[in-house]
Image (cartoon, helix red, strand yellow):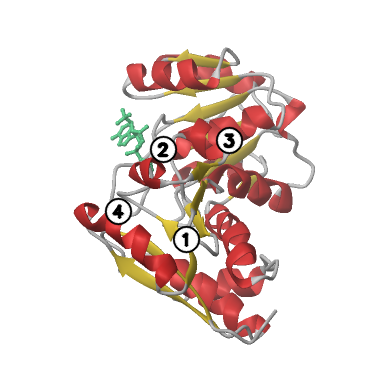
Amino acid sequence: MSTEIRLAGVIGDPIAHSKSPALHGHWLARYGIPGHYVPLKIARKDLKKTLRALPRMGFSGVNVTIPHKEHVLSFADSVTDRAALIGAANTLTFSANGQLQADNTDGVGFLANLYQNAPDWRADAGPALVLGAGGASRAVVSALLGDGAPQVFLVNRTRVRGETLREKLGARVKVMDWAHIPDLLPDISCLVNTTSLGMEGGQPLQIDLSDLRPTTLVTDIVYTPLQTGLLQQAAELGCPTVDGLGMLLHQAAPGFERWFGRKPDVDGDLRQAVLSA
Ligand code: ATR
């Protein structure tokens, strides 16, 4: 790598809450890389011209967060298959001539977190039950299917959103009602919450997990608090659990490697740096 100062960042609106600057900042400092990663508050009306300007300003790429994840696809010169499938991008890379490649690393980040923290679990071991049908769910469901989950049961408050997701992601997705959850629990190899239920200050996620097998992996993409009610209940039943912070850490790694030229470690030090940011 040359000694040129590399630039990357995260675009969103609002952006002040983003953990990404602390995360990438930790890696830059750890590896002594001369570069900066900055939060950029960009209004939707300014998105297109910002994406044209950033490569000219020397940026190698940016992460994308709410509310731009879907919209950026229409400005990309190329879109990876997984971003197209998910219908959203979280990682943009600018080529030397300013071309914009849009990728989505949420799904691989989700899986990498599980494989790191529950090494005995495999996506192809059995059916999964996914709660929620928003943007995060699309990434999670497509990742589970891509890694061989034989079936993904999908439960969402608004059933039609689940149906739309099934149409896009295929017949291994089966849309069920909340009322069916107790019948599904004994047969699943993993349970994933992708809804915002259980988040600090919000509504709780109320499900009785007693019928889960003790080998069923339970994970939550909510990471405030780290130990959600869902994870706590699962842990009390002896099930393996993985919290959602690792997904945030892992989804960041491919972008960092592309922009700053080094594959970063996702470990306890990084986790601590993000938690204390
Ligand atoms: P994200 O991109 O983070 O997934 P989203 O697209 O807003 O965010 O999706 C939020 C998910 O949480 C949805 O599945 C939503 O259910 P609906 O599709 O019915 O809106 C779910 N969710 C949010 N609040 C909920 C609540 N009070 N009860 C049940 N589900 C809820």
Q: If the image is split into quadrants, where does the N terminus sit?
A: bottom right
**Which is more N-terminal, label 1 or label 3?**
3
Residue 164 x %, y %: 40, 19
Residue drawn at x 56%, y 48% as measured from the top left = 105
Which label sits in the foreground, 2 or 4? 4
Q: Which residue does the image show at 62% across and 63% down from the upper left?
A: 258
Name which residue lies at 36% across and 22% down.
Answer: 161
Is the distance from the Cβ of mark 2 to the nearest ligand 1 atom less than 8 Å? Answer: yes
Residue beneath disc 4: 48
User: Which of marks 2 and 3 precedes in the sequence?
Assistant: 3
Dot 4 crowding, Cα within 10 Å, few <14, some 14–19, many 20+: some
Disc 4 residue type? Lys
The residue type indicated by label 2 comes to Gly
Question: Label 1: few (<14), some or many (≥20) within 10 Å?
Answer: some
Instruction: Find the distance from the CA under tag 3 to the CA under tag 1.
Output: 21 Å
Q: Quadrant of ligand 1?
A: top left
Q: Where is residue 111 drawn, in percent x and y? A: 65, 44
Please tell me whether mark 3 sits on a helix, a strand or a loop: helix
Which of label 3 and label 1 is nearer to you? 1
Residue bearing mark 1? 98
Residue at the disc numbered 2 = 135
Ligand 1 lies under 8 Å from the Cβ of mark 3? no
Residue at x 55%, y 30% (from the top left corner) = 141
Which of the pair 233/31 is nearer the observer?
A: 31
Check disc 4 and report its element: helix, strand or loop: helix
